[in-house]
């Protein structure tokens, strides 16, 4: 059967059109492929995908007829969690500029139940946030700001039994609570003193037992306050000026206490217990996860969410709690997430980032990849450190092989079947095929550096090391180690036979021209004084790149032992945390904000959005980078490992 030529042409055209796929967002080609891991479920609730950093405490505060959780992070940031999944930074505790201090209003009347009242222990002051976000000072003095002394108090110790509030001094206050309406009690002197603030704005000391020290204070506005330390709980009656009840040495490491109409609850963090005071006057178990001491003993102490990021009901490790002012439930925080716990013991996570979707059995857990927070690649393959079970090795597309389960320190590299990691003055060398069961397999830096005489010893009777502030380590094809030592302003080279030499010195021959870091100087915040303190180093062949503490980037020549400036940083330059070199000898840098940069014609180019367009899942971020031997870019996250096609990325 023969068809006309024009009909054949039409059929051919139709086939051609069908064969051509239009790249829609649903079917577009992805040039970023998943090597290992599972993508997290993206919940419709944006609160469940927040990065709350490391939570040190949790509060509830009502603004505009809505009750918001306030999170105090370990770095001193007070953050409001909004329902739309955004975070509003209320303040950076202990990190005020002079301009911010000048705008603080002094207002004793801020001691109102409507305000959020808290102590700022770093500055020894009491502060308040009003429902309309006005930030006011209640009492205390910024001793380092001479110009504001007339606004606050003199520096003399107050000896009177009662003192006007605007003349009160504090010494390491760690808590404040409202004992009755507009009457407040401050836990001062780092937990050793109780101080009463009455509605007439006078302050006096309350009698306390000798050698008494508390870690926290709470009240239900009934004229009593509740105090706790690691092992005990006390009830103090304000009118009677004494402790009226105590539960002495009955607990193991109390991390928090809550007092409200819901009852009195405590958290024993080491046991992951939440206990409630019953009608008989005893604390009984109210809630308990499997993350208890027995579980820890069986699982190598790996239930701490700071180490393994487990954060569901199986690994629930409560640290702080507070009663919701409008609902019959407790608000509880771990290091990374916020939960509600009803009086019927229903637990629900309401905010934070769930690091992994973890099944309920240990067998399932061990089968899952636990992320790739640090990467290293060489001609053998890629080495992925996941932060929980150690190092996985990936070669081609084969099933990963676990090599090593020791928790290394700092940055790591792999050479000649050994893992090297570094942190300040320590290099640890560990064989890839063995577990580290004793410290005889760990090598201090003194085993590497023999440049200084053995007769010069430190307090531990060990030879002094020439490296004291190492932050980065790399290796070349011949096995030479290169260490960026910030304290000495040098790049050290250690040969395979442990001979130490200086490859590059960034310190000026004139000591007065070498930048000195003064941690007491506010100018340190702009990073200028970290100029030329080497922070990151990477080498390949006869060249290398160095990033200093100000994030200037240098190109180094290993043969001539010289360097040239490649990129001059400015105040807008991002903070780099790792560096790698591609097959064309170009440097690639990953920032603290998980963006990926390279340098083109002396300019920093952000490639993060291009990666997203190529198919990288934006929601999980990037924690580590490396280049494989075939020239592809490896991208590690806390849940997965990816490979990106470099030819598509740079064109």
Image (spheres, rainbow, N blue to C red):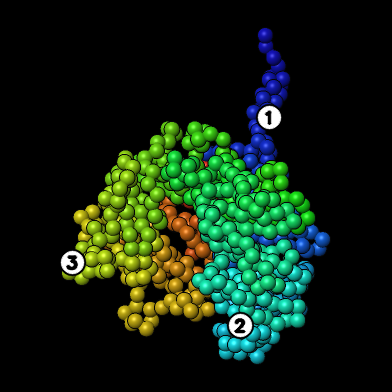
Label 2: which residue? 169
Q: Nearer the viewer, residue 278 or 400?
A: 278
Mark 2 / mark 1, whichever is N-terminal = 1
For label 2, count other residues whose C-alpha is less than 10 Å away and answer few (under 14), some (14-19) or many (20+). Answer: many
Lower sequence index among marks 3 and 2: 2
Instruction: Give the label, 3 or 1, closer to the camera.
Output: 3
Q: Which residue is mark 1?
A: 17
Q: Earlier in the sequence, mark 3 or mark 1?
A: 1
What residue is rendered at 50% in x and 71% in y? 211
Nearer to me, 24 or 477 = 477
Task: Tell me if residue 53 comes above or below residue 2 in the rendering.
Answer: below
Count the numbered circles shown.
3
Q: Which residue is mark 3?
A: 454
Horizontal side, residue 152 vs residue 192: left or right: right
Residue placed at 62% from the left, 58% from the top? 257
* Residue in the image at 61% along x and 82% along y: 169
Quarter of the figure with the N terminus: top right
What x and y, as percent, mark residue 606? 56, 57
Q: Quadrant of residue 344?
A: top right
Residue 4, given in percent of the width and then of the height, sits at 70, 16
261 displayed left or right of 217: right
Quadrant for residue 437, please give it: top left
């Amino acid at each position: 059967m023969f068809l006309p030529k024009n009909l054949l042409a039409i059929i051919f055209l139709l086939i051609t059109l069908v064969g051509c796929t239009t790249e829609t967002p649903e079917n577009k080609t992805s040039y970023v492929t998943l090597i290992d891991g599972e993508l997290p479920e993206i919940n419709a609730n944006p609160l469940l995908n927040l990065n709350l950093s490391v939570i040190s405490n949790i509060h509830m505060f009502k603004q505009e007829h809505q009750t918001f959780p306030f999170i105090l992070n370990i770095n001193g940031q007070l953050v409001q969690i909004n329902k739309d999944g955004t975070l509003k930074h209320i303040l950076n505790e202990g990190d005020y500029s002079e301009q911010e201090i000048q705008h603080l209003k002094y207002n004793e009347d801020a001691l109102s139940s409507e305000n959020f009242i808290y102590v700022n222990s770093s500055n020894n002051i009491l502060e308040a946030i009003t429902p309309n976000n006005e930030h006011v000072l209640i009492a205390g003095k910024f001793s380092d700001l001479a110009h504001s002394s007339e606004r606050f108090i003199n520096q003399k110790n107050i000896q009177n039994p009662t003192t006007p509030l605007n003349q009160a001094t504090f010494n390491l206050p760690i808590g404040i609570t409202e004992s009755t309406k507009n009457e407040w009690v401050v836990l001062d002197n780092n937990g050793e003193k109780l101080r009463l603030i009455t509605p007439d704005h006078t302050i006096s000391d309350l009698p306390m037992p000798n050698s008494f020290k508390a870690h926290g204070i709470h009240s239900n506005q009934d004229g009593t306050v509740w105090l706790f330390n690691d092992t005990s709980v006390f009830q103090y009656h304000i009118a009677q000026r004494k402790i009226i009840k105590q539960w002495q040495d009955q607990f193991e490491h109390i991390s928090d206490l809550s007092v409200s109409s819901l009852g009195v609850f405590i958290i024993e963090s080491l046991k992951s217990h939440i206990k409630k005071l019953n009608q008989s006057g005893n604390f009984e178990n109210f809630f308990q996860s499997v993350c208890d001491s027995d579980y820890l003993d069986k699982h190598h102490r790996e239930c701490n969410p700071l180490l393994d990021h487990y954060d569901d009901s199986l690994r629930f490790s409560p640290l702080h709690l507070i009663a919701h002012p409008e609902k019959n439930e407790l608000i509880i925080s771990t290091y990374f997430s916020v939960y509600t716990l009803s009086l019927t013991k229903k637990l629900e996570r309401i905010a934070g980032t769930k690091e992994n979707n973890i099944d309920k059995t240990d067998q399932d857990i061990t089968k899952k990849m636990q992320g790739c927070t640090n990467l290293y690649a060489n001609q053998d393959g890629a080495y992925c450190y996941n932060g929980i079970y150690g190092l996985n090795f990936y070669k081609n597309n084969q099933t990963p092989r676990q090599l090593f389960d020791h928790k290394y320190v700092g940055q790591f590299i792999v050479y000649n079947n050994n893992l090297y990691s570094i942190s300040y003055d320590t290099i640890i060398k560990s064989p890839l095929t063995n577990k580290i069961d004793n410290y005889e397999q760990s090598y201090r830096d003194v085993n590497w550096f023999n440049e200084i005489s053995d007769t010069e010893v430190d307090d531990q009777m060990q030879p002094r090391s020439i490296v004291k502030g190492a932050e980065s380590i790399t290796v070349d094809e011949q096995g030479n180690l290169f260490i960026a030592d910030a304290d000495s302003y040098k790049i050290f080279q250690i040969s395979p036979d442990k001979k130490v030499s200086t490859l590059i010195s960034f310190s000026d021959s004139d000591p007065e021209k070498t930048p000195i870091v003064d941690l007491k100087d506010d100018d340190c915040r702009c990073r200028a004084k970290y100029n030329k303190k080497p922070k990151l180093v990477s080498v390949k062949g006869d060249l290398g790149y160095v990033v200093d503490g100000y994030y200037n980037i240098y190109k180094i020549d290993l043969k001539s032992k010289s360097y040239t400036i490649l990129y001059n940083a400015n105040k807008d330059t991002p903070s780099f945390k790792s560096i790698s070199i591609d097959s064309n000898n170009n440097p690639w840098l990953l920032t603290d904000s998980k963006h990926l940069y390279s340098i083109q014609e002396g300019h920093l180019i952000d490639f993060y959005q291009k990666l997203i367009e190529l198919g990288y899942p934006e929601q999980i971020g990037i924690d580590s980078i490396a280049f494989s031997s075939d020239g592809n870019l490896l991208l590690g996250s806390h849940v997965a490992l990816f490979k990106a096609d470099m030819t598509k990325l740079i064109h």
